[in-house]
């Protein structure tokens, strides 16, 4: 009973710390809500071909709802990161060193890919998609017809959050690839055995994650296959270098025995 009470107390304290973290993040985000809105809108404004691009709202409470979505969006991100941190601290004492090392490696790899994917989304993917969709408003043959785009602020935020989560989800697939390559590092014969299964898994993931068109499925599948093969060849290259480094030592031992 004493151990159960200690576990209960620790879980309660950690949950209380997580709640304080989430509430404090919400309060700080509300203080800087205008800056956060600018950071979300700025990539589209900076890289857009339009010189007079602006956003409209048609409801009195729409701007407040946009600020509320941004605050909750940021607060949930910080909350999830701290959940992972507290989970590792709570489970670390009951794990073997090898298990703790593997879990730490997965989380570190996931965080690195997460940061890279966020930068890639805001600097490359969002501006390109914004320019692509806005390019359809101009007619090259009918010069007398013009389409004028007036984006609602809440619709743009919905587009941003949806695209953001899709990009993060796609990029986190590479964590599974890196983990799989680390698992088969010591046995290269398993690469041939699992190759068809891995390719089929890529096809299934591409079908589930992409829109219902064959082009996007093929592009994502080929990208995953390319990254997977690149990781495999890098592992083979590392193993060859390790064998070349260890070979002179083994030869020196055999010559001394002779």
Image: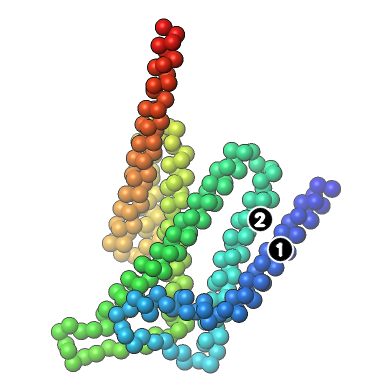
Q: Residues within 10 Å of mark 1 (few under 14, many from 20)?
A: some
Image side of residue 223 versus residue 183, left or right: left
| x 59%, y 60%: residue | 81
Q: Quickly name the residue at label 1.
A: 17
Q: Position of residue 214 (x, y in %)?
A: 29, 61
The reply to whether dot 2 and dot 1 touch (C-beta < 8 Å) is yes
Residue 170 position within the rendered picture, expressed as x and y whole percent measured from the top left:
42, 59
| Residue 157 seen by the camera | no
The residue pinned by badge 2 equals 86
* Residue drawn 34% across the image and 76% down it: 47
Instruction: Establish if 144 lies above or below 110.
Output: below
Residue occupying the point 37% across, 44% down: 231
The crowding category of the residue bearing disc 2, from other C-alpha atoms within 10 Å (few below 14, some 14 to 19, many at least 20), is some
Residue drawn at x 73%, y 64% as measured from the top left: 16
- Nearer-the-camera pick, 207 or 76: 76
Q: CA distance from mark 2 to mark 1?
A: 9 Å
């Amino acid at each position: 009973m004493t151990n159960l009470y200690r576990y209960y107390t620790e879980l309660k304290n950690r949950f209380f710390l997580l709640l304080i973290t989430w509430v404090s993040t919400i309060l700080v985000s509300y203080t800087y809500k205008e800056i956060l809105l600018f950071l979300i809108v700025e990539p589209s404004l900076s890289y857009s071909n339009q010189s007079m691009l602006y956003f409209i709202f048609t409801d009195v409470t729409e701007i407040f709802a946009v600020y509320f979505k941004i605050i909750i969006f940021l607060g949930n991100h910080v909350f999830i990161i701290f959940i992972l941190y507290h989970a590792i601290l709570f489970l670390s004492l009951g794990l073997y060193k090898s298990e703790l090392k593997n879990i730490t490696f997965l989380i570190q790899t996931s965080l690195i890919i997460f940061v890279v994917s966020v930068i890639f989304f805001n600097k490359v993917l969002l501006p390109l998609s914004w320019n692509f969709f806005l390019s359809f408003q101009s007619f090259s043959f009918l010069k007398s017809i013009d389409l004028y785009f007036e984006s609602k602020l809440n619709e743009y935020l919905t587009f941003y959050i949806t695209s953001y989560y899709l990009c993060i989800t796609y990029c986190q697939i590479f964590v599974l690839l890196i983990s799989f390559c680390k698992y088969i590092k010591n046995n290269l014969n398993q690469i041939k055995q699992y190759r068809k299964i891995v390719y089929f898994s890529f096809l299934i993931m591409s079908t589930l994650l992409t829109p219902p068109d064959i082009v996007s499925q093929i592009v994502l599948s080929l990208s995953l296959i390319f990254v997977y093969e690149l990781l495999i060849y890098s592992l083979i290259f590392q193993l060859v270098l390790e064998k070349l480094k260890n070979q002179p030592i083994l030869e020196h031992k055999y010559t001394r025995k002779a």
